[in-house]
Amino acid sequence: MIPSGDDIVDVQFETVGPAAPTARKPRRPADPAPDRGLGLFRTAERRPAGPRKPMPLPMFAFIATLSACASFYVAGGHALFAATAAITKPVTPSGIVLEDTATRIDTSGGRAVFVIHATIANALDVAGIVPPVAITFERSDGAGSVTHTITRGERLAPGERMAFTTRVPAGDYAGTEPRIALVTRR
């Protein structure tokens, strides 16, 4: 549709200002140029610019060694300092006992795994904390044993029982029966 002459309105706009000129505010002085970089955060007193002494080598070596040790500890080195099940002897704690242990080999997933069912009971008159469970396999070549530790930590009330099931890869010890025990650190 093409508009006709009656549909078009010619409009012009004009900006009207105040009758009297307004007084402008005086300009404030410009801010001083900032110091370069982090010099902005320095205190007003400045030391005279002179040759700086380098950090002594023993101090640098100490800081570097401390930093490396802290990084190693945080990144996983703390595991070296924790007591492991291989170092501690599996001992049954008094009152908290392992009952009804049953093991079977499951090959349904394509890889053989030990499926271990057990019950932990608290025969004490007070609440107790469940210690870690050690599952030990003797190597078929007689070269020692391999221990898998399952960390527990649940609190059992007097007379309470807790059943659990875990899966451990059978690996090279599929023909051996695992030993299952509660671990205490002495």
Image (tube, rainbow, N blue to C red):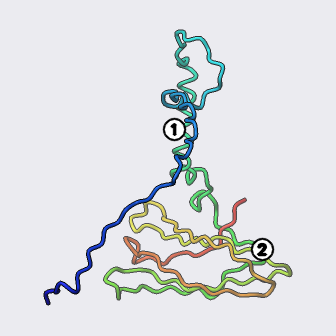
- Specify whether 185 is left or right of 15: right
Give SS at disc 1.
Answer: helix
Choose top left, top right, bottom left or bottom right for residue 43.
Answer: top right
Report the residue at 55% width, 75% height from top.
Answer: 179
Which is nearer the eye, 50 or 98? 50
- Total labels drawn: 2
- Specify whether 86 is left or right of 11: right
Report the residue at 81% width, 78% height from top.
Answer: 127
Which is nearer the eye, 98 or 25? 25
- Mark 1 lies on residue: 68
- Specify whether 56 is left or right of 184: left
Report the residue at 35% width, 86% height from top.
Answer: 107
Which numbered marker is on residue 94?
Answer: 2
Q: Say what amino acid the circle numbered 2 marks.
A: Ser
Residue 18 position within the rendered picture, expressed as x and y whole percent measured from the top left: 51, 54
Give SS at disc 2.
Answer: loop
Q: Say what amino acid the circle numbered 1 marks.
A: Ala
Tag 2 near tag 1, CB within 8 Å: no
* Vertical order, 55 against 148 (above or below): above
Which is nearer the eye, 158 or 50? 50
